[in-house]
Image (cartoon, rainbow, N blue to C red):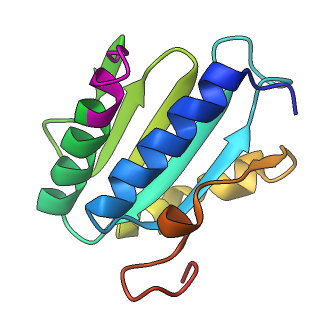
């Protein structure tokens, strides 16, 4: 993996914040060899529009405590797929239906997986993934 230490730290913090708001199926990919614009994509799901917004707010708040603000935010109004661009990492928070439809994992499956904290990888019931 060639993701920077900063990107890995931000990924861990963002994953932890998302998990605190019961985001599901968190997975992170080191896309640094494929893209020059960012190092890591963090992808997670939420059950409904309200939860998507809650996850987005939690991630932004956590990374703000680390001195990082998003340079770009897309999809906030619709609440179905929100993209937060923090330069070193890009966080995708998707409604479960959009996640299934767009299947981002299929696109990035050849990239190395970045480990997320065990607490973040575990679902709300404590089970890993879904």
Q: Where is residue 130 in the image (x, y as percent from the top left)?
A: 54, 83
Q: Residue at x 49, y 63 (%)?
A: 120
Number of numbered tags placed on the structure image:
0
**Quadrant in which residue 111 is drawn:** top right
Decide if residue 73 is on the left or right side of residue 89.
Answer: left
> Magenta stretch mostly in which secondary structure?
loop
Q: Which residue is drawn at 19% across and 61% down?
A: 51
Q: Where is residue 58 in the image (x, y as percent from the top left)?
A: 24, 44
* Rendered position, 93 above or below 49: above
Q: Where is residue 46 in the image (x, y as percent from the top left)?
A: 31, 65
Q: Position of residue 19 (x, y in %)?
A: 38, 61
Decide if residue 71 is on the left or right side of residue 25.
Answer: left
Is 117 or 73 nearer to us in this picture? 117
Decide if residue 92 is on the left or right side of residue 70.
Answer: right
Q: Can residue 75 be seen in the rendering of this structure?
A: no
* Rendered position, 51 above or below 41: below
Q: Residue at x 65, y 33 (%)?
A: 8
- The quadrant of the image that shows the N terminus is top right
Range drawn in magenta = 62-70
């Amino acid at each position: 993996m060639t993701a920077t230490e900063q990107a890995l730290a931000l990924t861990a913090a963002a994953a932890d914040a998302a998990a605190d708001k019961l985001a599901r199926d968190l997975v992170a990919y080191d896309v640094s060899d494929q893209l020059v614009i960012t190092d890591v994509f963090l992808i997670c799901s939420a059950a409904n529009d309200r939860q998507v917004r809650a996850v987005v707010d939690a991630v932004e708040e956590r990374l703000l405590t680390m001195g990082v603000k998003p340079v770009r935010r897309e999809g906030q109004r619709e609440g179905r797929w929100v993209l937060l661009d923090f330069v070193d990492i890009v966080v995708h928070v998707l409604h479960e239906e959009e996640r299934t439809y767009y299947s981002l994992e299929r696109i990035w499956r050849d990239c190395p997986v970045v480990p997320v904290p065990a607490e973040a990888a575990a679902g709300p019931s404590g089970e890993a993934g879904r």
